[in-house]
Image: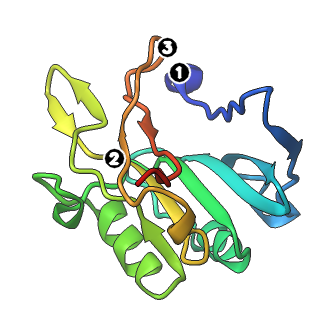
Amino acid sequence: GDNDRRGVALLINSNLASTAHSLPNHLIRLNAVAANLIINDLIILIISFYIPANTQVPDDLLQYASQNRHTIIMGDFNARHTDFGDIDSNPTGRSLIQTTTNLPLQRLYNTEPTFINARGASISDHIFVSEQLLPLVNPHSSIGTTVTSDHLPLTTQKPSTDK
């Protein structure tokens, strides 16, 4: 059926300390997985998320993510908006803008298409980080490489401390 190609994954390099993070019961219904990444004394909650096209962004997931001081929430939001650099906006994109405006989450900058098919291209995949974590990550995301998806992955890196 149509759901055969949908899913969510979160891969963390085996050289990095991490633990599984169980989402609360009220979020289990969502296509989301989470882990705690441990870097020195810092615990970063990472949530990978998928929402089908033309679906309302789940405010409760974004609220949950924003309650943690050090959070990264990323994935296929199917959210298009001209504020993201897309040529079009959709209801999911408008909902995402409205919801995140009042939360301590910042979208990492990217204006390159993350989904490309025969009908065109869109910026529908996003990375948001908590405001407390923003100084520790590069504020720009970039297109990574993939071999298993029709979406291009977004990546970010820790800012260089080289002078």
In the picture, the quarter occupied by the C terminus is bottom left
Sequence-earlier tag: 2 or 1: 1
Where is residue 106? Give x, y as percent. Answer: 45, 71
Q: What element does badge 3 sit on?
A: loop
Q: Which residue is mark 2?
A: 124
* Residue closer to the observer: 151 or 28: 151
Q: How many neighbours does mark 2 have within 10 angstroms: few (below 14), some (14-19), or many (20 or more)? A: many
Numbered circle sitting on residue 148:
3
Residue 148 is left or right of residue 17, and the answer is left
Q: What element does badge 1 sit on?
A: helix
Residue that protrudes farthest toward the left in the picture: 87
Numbered circle sitting on residue 125:
none
Residue at 53 percent across and 50 percent down: it is: 158
Residue at 56 percent across and 63 percent down: it is: 136
Q: Which residue is mark 1?
A: 5
* Residue closer to the observer: 110 or 140: 140
Residue that protrudes farthest toward the front in the picture: 163
Q: Amino acid at mark 1?
A: Arg
Residue 12 is left or right of residue 43, and the answer is left
Q: Are marks 1 and 3 in contact (CB under 8 Å)?
A: no
Where is residue 37? Give x, y as percent. Answer: 78, 49
Q: Amino acid at mark 3?
A: Thr
Q: How many neighbours does mark 3 have within 10 angstroms: few (below 14), some (14-19), or many (20 or more)? A: few
Residue at 87 percent across and 62 percent down: it is: 25
